[in-house]
Image (cartoon, rainbow, N blue to C red):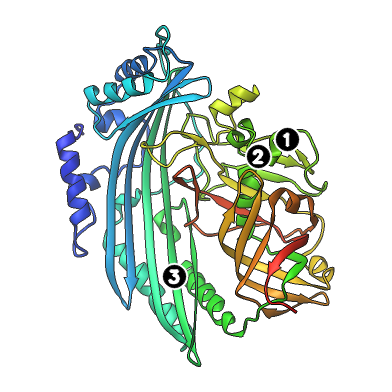
Amino acid sequence: MKSISRRNFLKGAAAAAAVGLSTPLFPNHWLELARVEEKDYFEREFGITDNLCQKILAKALSRGGDYADLYFEHTIDNALILEDGQVNRAFASISLGVGVRAVKGDQVGYGFTQDLSEKSMLEAAATAATISAAQPVQPAGKFVSLKLKNYYPLQSLLTSIPIEKKLPLVQKLNDRCFSLSSLVVKVNASYFDQQKRIMVVTSDGVKAEDLQPRNYLYASVIAEKNGKRERAGWNLGGRYDFSFYTEKVIKEIAEKAIKRVLVLFEAVQPPAGEIPVVLGPGVTGVLLHEAIGHGMEADFNRKKMSTYATMLGKKVAESFVTIVDDGTIPNLPGSINVDDEGIPGQKTILVDRGILTSYIHDRISARYYKVKPTGNGRRESYRHYVLPRMRNTYMLAGPATPEEIIKSVKKGIYVEDVSNGQVKIGEGDFAFYVSQGKLIEDGKLTAPIKDVNIMGNGPKMLRNIGMVANDFQMSPGGGGSCGKGGQAVPVGFGQPTCLVKSLTVGGVKA
């Protein structure tokens, strides 16, 4: 098939944005691109040859520099939103462009353009080149294409699935939620999918291409009882083929959302103070991600902003605590076949049996610490430069059982889910709202709780983990994104049930 011109691309983008619900979300010439093969996609469709890449990289290094890379991206997003029984909103967007980065030491020059003409790309490269003022450096004369494992295989492209097959998902989810309880007064059901193709080409001769799907199905429910309203929701998703969204998945989302909203009518506020907190499995891993994981990202440590900056090789937790950041778990939202610097997806042990053994690295921090990159160089889009970012961050299972942990607590709270977190990366201080949980009284789970915050310090919380259970779970949701430096990237998180000996609980005074 011949390459699509810049003018035709803009026509396609405009048509996609303005499309109505009675027609496919994309014009026919976009659906013609519905081929799963990844190799040479940008050359085939947009005329991006190796010779052209060498010319752009040479321009990026025309004033010197240690390294340069190109990040090509073609992303197609779709969203359907059902409210008050009707699909009344639908969104679609198409993004195409390239980011050009030149690196000198720990300094970055960056330019980007959505115009994939040679002239425009060379102008972006000239912008990136201004970071340095030395003799020109020549990029590698030949690129070697990486052979990558695929952690999110597709049977067919998401763009090849017509809207007629996506609409029933939100309608059935809406109907299922209403059928489960007469207390339900409002349901919002939404479906989102994204198909991102990337190509990374580096001045040291690496070329890597990837096709990254992302999708989720979500229900938000409002219920009313005796004049009192409560809200809760649930989603499932990740990097899946469309075939993931079965009747079973719809049923699970609806049942979980309804269960979570109805329990809030019985919820009470716990007593305030410093008390033991048991974190349940799976979803509460977001607390591990926010309060601890960010502090292990290497840029914060290289700049001496993190508490962990001097802790490599030292004890930061008990011996039964091991924390991992992993890009290789099939279908999870944080998994990546290759990062945005051309480093293959991999698994990195951050805390090994209580000892801090590694930070989360991109190429810049890895060079600074004289270690290999960990495959954590990520960016939101071609408009953004790379930062070291988490992928799927989790704590491994421990030797206890969940029952033993709960039984060990005389008076405390059990946290099932948290939201609206705030974290100070340097110090590690955090505050999170507990959206689902229970009281623990005399070693037993009792009344559900709500309207409570938990507060603490991440490194201190890590040291205060007193027990870890054998019920490890990853959060099953696909809608989670992590924000840093004005950029959002999809991530995953998880953990087993664990006991934190003491956290500040902002409930009610005794």
Q: Quadrant of the N terminus?
A: top left
Q: Is residue 460 visible?
A: yes
Residue pictured at 28% horizontal, 66% vertical: 89
Quarter where residue 273 is shown: bottom right
* Residue type beneath disc 1: Thr
Callouts 1 and 3 close, C-beta under 8 Å:
no
Residue under circle 1?
Answer: 357
Question: Callout 2: few (<14), some (14-19), or many (20+) C-alpha neighbours within 10 Å?
Answer: many
Residue tagged 2: 306
Secondary structure of the residue carrying numbered label 3: strand
Residue drawn 57% across and 84% down? 265
Residue situated furthest top in the rendering = 135
Name the residue carrying label 3. 219
Q: Position of residue 438 (x, y in %)?
A: 68, 75
Which amino acid is tagged 2?
Ser
Q: Is residue 176 above or below residue 300?
A: below
Which numbered disc, 1 or 2, marks the residue that appears first in the sequence?
Answer: 2
Q: Which amino acid type is marked by label 3?
A: Ala
Give percent across and percent down for residue 469: 77, 59
Residue 284: image quadrant is bottom right
- How far is disc 2 from disc 3 in space, using C-alphas? 37 Å
Q: Confirm whether residue 246 shows in the render.
A: no
- Specify which label sits upstream in the sequence, 1 or 3: 3
